[in-house]
Amino acid sequence: MVHNMNISIITITYNNLVGLMKTVNSVLQQSQILNIEYIIIDGGSSDGTKEYLESLPQYVSWISEPDRGISHAFNKGIEKASGDMLLFLNSGDSFLDFDIIKNMLSDISNNPVDILSYKVQVSDKVFIPSTDNERKIWKRCIEPHQGTFIKKTVFNEIGGFSEEYRIRMDYHFFARCKAMGYSFTYIPVTIVKYEPGGTSMIKDNRYRFWAEGMSIKFLYDLKLSFKDLLKIVVYRRDRVLL
């Protein structure tokens, strides 16, 4: 067990108080809480989030102010983080049990890599990634950021999330990591319940989701699928706005 390793968990939120409370509870109830630095970045919510943040224990660090979007909020969290590895657990997402960080510390001691990734549950039958093939996950850059621990040194070396991408910033970040040759391990264990309905799932954003994904695939020479081309045609036909 790597007891001297600290994990920075970063939660970004905006007007999602109920979801935030669920996420915070799942973090603060972790059995290895002494190894957790918890950081919450609120985009200036108007639903009572700031008052809730003020009621949290003093060891929870938070900011509540307007930001320029998801990437900017992530990057603000990165700037505050001092842990050895970082995890981005958005408001509404929650750990599946109280020993997630304890088990992760054991896993990283056996797999001393730059990026350690697990599975995330979306629904009873839907998981991300949908495959447990480690080589395929890394090659396609399809690891879920909610279930992926990243060394702080990676951010120090290549920077944070690009604000050029409003939705696929995590996909772009992992493509950069792969191109830079960072080490990666995937463990086929589900650690997080993901809350659907985020920015990428809004109908008006579906074209942008796929368009950003396409641009990243061309930029980093990632495999283009027939589904990619079909989606672009469908969204253009339906005139979903960027």
Image (cartoon, rainbow, N blue to C red):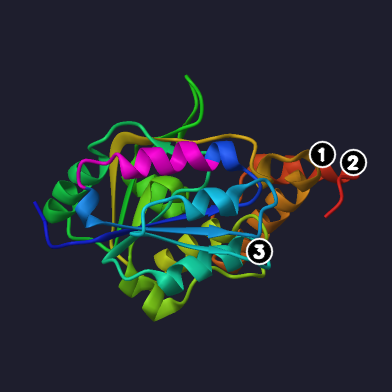
Which residues lie in the magenta part?
20-32
Q: Mark 1 Cα within 10 Å, few/some/many (few <14, many 20+)?
A: few
Q: Is residue 7 left or right of residue 43?
A: left
Q: Which mark is residue 234?
A: 1
The residue most toward the top is 124
Query: Mark 2: which secondary structure?
Result: helix
Answer with mark 1 or mark 3, whichever residue precedes in sequence. Answer: 3
Q: Mark 3 Cα within 10 Å, few/some/many (few <14, many 20+)?
A: some
Q: Residue type at mark 2: give it.
A: Arg
CA separation, marks 1 and 3? 21 Å
Answer with mark 3 or mark 2, whichever residue precedes in sequence. Answer: 3
Question: CB of mark 2 within 8 Å of CB of mark 1?
Answer: yes
Q: Residue type at mark 1: give it.
A: Val
Question: CB of mark 1 within 8 Å of CB of mark 3?
Answer: no
Q: Residue type at mark 3: give it.
A: Tyr
Q: Residue at x 91, y 45 (%)?
A: 239
Q: Position of residue 204 (x, y in %)?
A: 81, 44
Q: Position of residue 2 (x, y in %)?
A: 11, 56
**Could one spot residue 178 in this view of the protein?**
yes
> Which of the 4 image quarters holds residue 10?
bottom left
CA separation, marks 2 and 1? 5 Å
Q: Position of residue 140 (x, y in %)?
A: 47, 51
Q: Which residue is mark 2?
A: 237
In the displayed structure, 94 sits above or below 38; it is above
> Is 177 part of what is drawn in magenta?
no
Residue closer to the observer: 64 or 240: 64
Q: Which residue is mark 3?
A: 165
Q: Residue at x 55, y 38 (%)?
A: 19
